[in-house]
Amino acid sequence: MTTIPARLAQTTRISGSLAESHARARSLYRNYFRSAPELCALYALDVPPSVVRAKLRQKFEAHRHVRDIAVLDVMLFKAHIEYQETMNAWKQVPHIMRWFAEEEAAPTPQTFLEKFYAGRDEGRTPTGQGN
């Protein structure tokens, strides 16, 4: 498959109002949402498109509280670059799977026994005696 660099390229835009930037964000979200099956096929991911869509929604929802138009414009610009790089296959599978890394990370042990079972002995002193 050959990629055409300008296939998804857009010029940088400055939003005139908060409503306009929200409309641009919804448009970008829809593009991501619609391309989830293609993304799974393109990168041969072993996650279904529904999981990719849920992760994309989570990423967009994390920035829902932003109200500054200039900040939103920069975030939209970066998100569109991410979309273009992803859909033009300029990434590798580990780049895509990094989106899911926080779900796969094991919780850090908190209590003494959890640390012991995990093989952590941070409380040991150089002489071999614990605190």
Image (cartoon, rainbow, N blue to C red):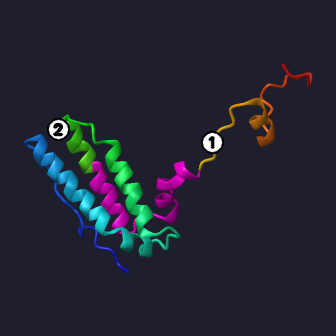
Q: Quadrant of the C terminus?
A: top right
Q: Which mark is residue 42?
A: none
Q: Main secondary structure of the magenta part?
A: helix
Where residue 92 sits: x, y (%)? Answer: 48, 64
Badge 1 density bin: few <14, some 14–19, many ≥20, Cα 10 Å: few
Where residue 77 sits: x, y (%)? Answer: 24, 49
Residue closest to the far left:
16
Q: Residue at x 46, y 69 (%)?
A: 48
Q: Is residue 85 above or below residue 77?
A: below
Where residue 88 sits: x, y (%)? Answer: 34, 69
Q: Quadrant of the N terminus?
A: bottom left
Q: Residue at x 79, y 25 (%)?
A: 123
Which SS class for mark 1? loop
Q: Amino acid at mark 2?
A: Ile
Task: Find the magenta span and give its range.
Answer: 78-104
Where residue 89 sits: x, y (%)? Answer: 39, 69
Q: Which mark is residue 69?
A: 2
Q: Residue at x 50, y 59 (%)?
A: 97
> Quadrant location of residue 122?
top right
Report whether 98 appears left or right of 17. Answer: right
Mark 1 or mark 2: which comes first in sequence? 2
Question: As rendered, which of 126 and 48 lies closer to the eye?
Answer: 48
Residue 128 included in the magenta stretch of the image: no
Q: Gap between marks 1 and 2, in whole Å?
A: 36 Å
Q: Amino acid at mark 1?
A: Pro
Q: Is residue 104 above or below residue 120?
A: below
Report whether 62 appears left or right of 45. Answer: left
Q: Which mark is residue 107?
A: 1
